[in-house]
Amino acid sequence: KQEVTQIPAALSVPEGENLVLNCSFTDSAIYNLQWFRQDPGKGLTSLLLIQSSQREQTSGRLNASLDKSSGRSTLYIAASQPGDSATYLCAVLYSGGGADGLTFGKGTHLIIQP
Amino acid sequence: DAGVTQSPTHLIKTRGQHVTLRCSPISGHKSVSWYQQVLGQGPQFIFQYYEKEERGRGNFPDRFSARQFPNYSSELNVNALLLGDSALYLCASSPKRGWETQYFGPGTRLLVL
């Protein structure tokens, strides 16, 4: 069974700090990995998508890395702001042609203290 | 352009009833996927439809069914509702078979009493 694990489950840091969220997956035969943001009671917003052939993707203050061989991805948030407070979800698409859909972790609940 | 839209936004049902949830994908997107998100958990894959055909199914009972229409909108049907079906139901669309970035709608919050 393919599993995605996110550590930590919750994180609270002061505004301005740089932080790293971790994601691990059990099966390295992935097609891509995607990081999402979810605000309370809302849908998911895609932040970054990394194809299996890529090592990292960057968007503004966000940088995501992928190491398929070790089954790990990290999401780096620079100069955190209170507006970054949300739940961050990691999701993996396995190389079955997408027929199994995305496999999600349980998320990291992030609070940025003003 | 409008994003993925879902209706209704909230729904309350009682055990044993039936429910239909609706999703309209982003214009030009031909793939629609459905996910169930129970409180405190990550979303779980239910179905994927592409070009009106089922292309993938998650580990959900036969009480769950779906279909995709010629305009690529989709319905998720759940029969014989159980308390455990209470969740946020998310719809996602992508241009092709879901191998690209998936764009999620705001979800339908279902409460089963």
Image (cartoon, coloured by chain):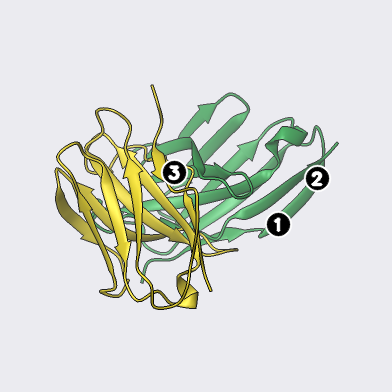
Q: Indicate the secondary structure of the residue bearing disc 3.
A: strand
Residue B88 image offset from top left, x and y in percent = 49, 57
Q: Indicate the secondary structure of the residue bearing disc 1.
A: strand
Q: Chain B is shown in which shade?
A: yellow
Q: Residue at x 38, y 72 (%)?
A: B17
> Residue B97 lies in what quarter of the image?
top left
Q: Residue at x 21, y 54 (%)?
A: B67
Residue A104 image offset from top left, x and y in percent = 46, 57
Q: Chain A is shown in which shade?
A: green
Which residue, given by chain and number where applicable, does mark 2 sit on?
A13
Task: Measure the C-alpha gap from mark 1 to mark 3.
Answer: 19 Å
Which residue, given by chain and number where applicable, does mark 3 sit on?
A34
Q: Residue at x 24, y 58 (%)?
A: B66
Counting residues from the start of the chain, the first of labels 3 and 2 encountered is 2
Counting residues from the start of the chain, the first of labels 1 and 3 encountered is 1
Q: Residue at x 41, y 31 (%)?
A: B3
Callout 2 environment at 10 Å: few (<14), some (14 to 19), or many (20+)? some
